[in-house]
Amino acid sequence: MELDASHTGHESSVEGVEVQLEPEGEAGIRTARKKLIGRVLTSKMLNKGAVKDIISKAWSLVEELNISDLGPNVFLFNFSGEKDAKRVFDGGPWFVMGYFLSLQY
């Protein structure tokens, strides 16, 4: 995963997928702390629905989790609370179908 940071925001590029985050003050920073970008490290195309089901069950969160598909084996995890995002990030390593799931804030 390649990360480029500038003074106006943060950009991340993963195999042609670009995500740009521009926090707006303290509220934007708190929102960014509720999001993780994850990539399942395999060249094999995994079933997106199955990946989402496995992750939802493995993390067994109390609060809501929205999972968006950003590209082949790349997902945006939008947590309802910072504590859940931190617990998941710190609680790894995580594996999906035997493949490592790399997570970044």
Image (tube, grey):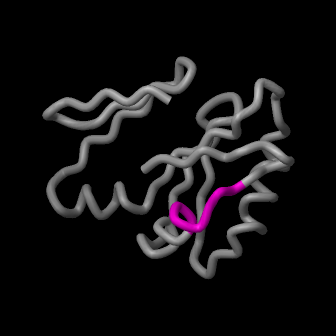
Q: Range of the magenta residues?
A: 88-94
Q: Quadrant of residue 13?
A: top left
Q: Is residue 4 above or below residue 22?
A: above
Where is residue 48? Give x, y as percent.
78, 41
Q: Quadrant of residue 66?
A: bottom right
Residue at x 31%, y 27% (from the top left corner): 4
Residue at x 85%, y 48% (from the top left corner): 97
Residue at x 60%, y 44% (from the top left corner): 102
Q: Is residue 79 above or below residue 17?
A: below
Q: Is residue 1 above or below residue 85?
A: above
Q: In the displayed structure, does residue 18 sit left or right of residue 64? A: left
Where is residue 105? Give x, y as percent.
42, 50
Where is residue 54? Give x, y as percent.
80, 58
Where is residue 76? Give x, y as percent.
55, 46
Check residue 90 for magenta coloring. Answer: yes
Residue at x 72%, y 64% (from the top left corner): 56
Q: In the displayed structure, does residue 73 sit left or right of residue 45? A: left
